[in-house]
Amino acid sequence: MPWHVCAAAAIGRSHVDGGLPCQDAFARTCEGEVLIAVVCDGAGSQPRSHEGAQALSAEVVAFVAARVRDGAIAPSASLDAMTVCARDAIASARAALAERATRDGAELAHFAATLVGVVADRDGGWFFHIGDGVGAALDEAGACTVSLPENGEYANETYFVTGDEWEAHLRVSPIAGPVASVLLMSDGAMPFAMTKDLAAPYRAFFDPVTRYLVSVDAGTGSQALLGTLSDPRTDTITSDDKTLLVALQRE
C-alpha cells in the first residue's frame, strides 16, 4: 500500500463536561495507489450528530471507493467529473440518513455534520468539502494546497451536509502533484495543527508528528495521535472534539 494512514478522533473537554459523545468521525481506505478519506464533524447542537458524522464518513468513502474501483473516477479526473462523484456520494449518504430519520421519527437536522474529504494519489487529486474543517496536501518541498473552512456570517456558524442548500456549499478543489502527505481535520484540531492564517500545517506540530508516524505501523501511529489529541494540555487551546487524519506516501 503506497499510503501510510494514521487517524484519531478525541472527545473535547466541553463534551466530557456536558455528558456528550465525541461528535467527530472519520473513514479512510485505499484502492490501489488512490487514497479516499473523509472527516466529519457533527453539530454540537444536534442530538444525533455523532451518528450523522459516523454514517456520512463511512458511506461517502465506500461510495467513492467503489467509483474508483470500477474506473468511474480517478485523481486525474476533471473538475466536472469529480464534482459529480462527490455530489452523488454525499446525496446517497444523505438519503440514507433521511430514511433513518423517518424510521426513527427524527428530523434529518438531528444528524447534522460537516464533511471534508480527499481523493488523491502521488500525482495529485481533489478535496471535496462542505462546512468547516481543513484539508491540506503537501509536496516533498513543503508547498501546500489547502481546502479552507466555510463559515457563516459569524465565526461559530457553518454549513452541514443535512442542510437544504448543501449542494450550493459543496466545494471541490484540485491538488497539484506530486503529493507527499495529506491531512484532514475537524475544526477542533485546527488551532494547533495549522498556522493561524490556515495557509499550511504548523510545522512545530506537524514535523515531529510525521517523523514519528513514519517510524511505526498505522495502528501504533493512530494510538499515538489519539494520545496527542487527548492530552489535557489541548484543553487550554480548544474544548471541542479533535480529529486528525495524516496520510503519508511510502517510498
Image (cartoon, grey):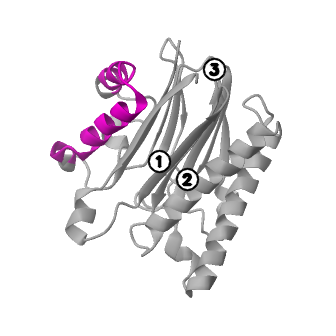
First in sequence: mark 3 vs mark 2: 2
Q: From this viewpoint, which residue is outermost toward the bottom?
A: 105
The answer to whether any part of residue 194 appears in the image is: no
Q: Residue 97: x and y, percent?
A: 61, 70
Residue that numbered label 2 is attached to? 115
Q: Quadrant of the N terminus?
A: top right
Q: In the rendered structure, which segment of residues is drawn in magenta?
A: 206-234
For label 3, the SS is: loop
Query: Which residue is located at x 37 percent, y 42 percent?
Result: 190
Query: Which residue is located at x 68 percent, y 43 percent?
Result: 172
Query: Looking at the rendered structure, which numbered label has been put on residue 189?
Result: none
Q: How far apart are the two marked residues, 3 and 2, measured between alpha carbons?
A: 23 Å
Q: Residue 57: x and y, percent?
A: 56, 53
Looking at the picture, which amino acid does disc 3 mark? Arg
Looking at the picture, which amino acid does disc 1 mark? Gly
44 lies above or below 87: below
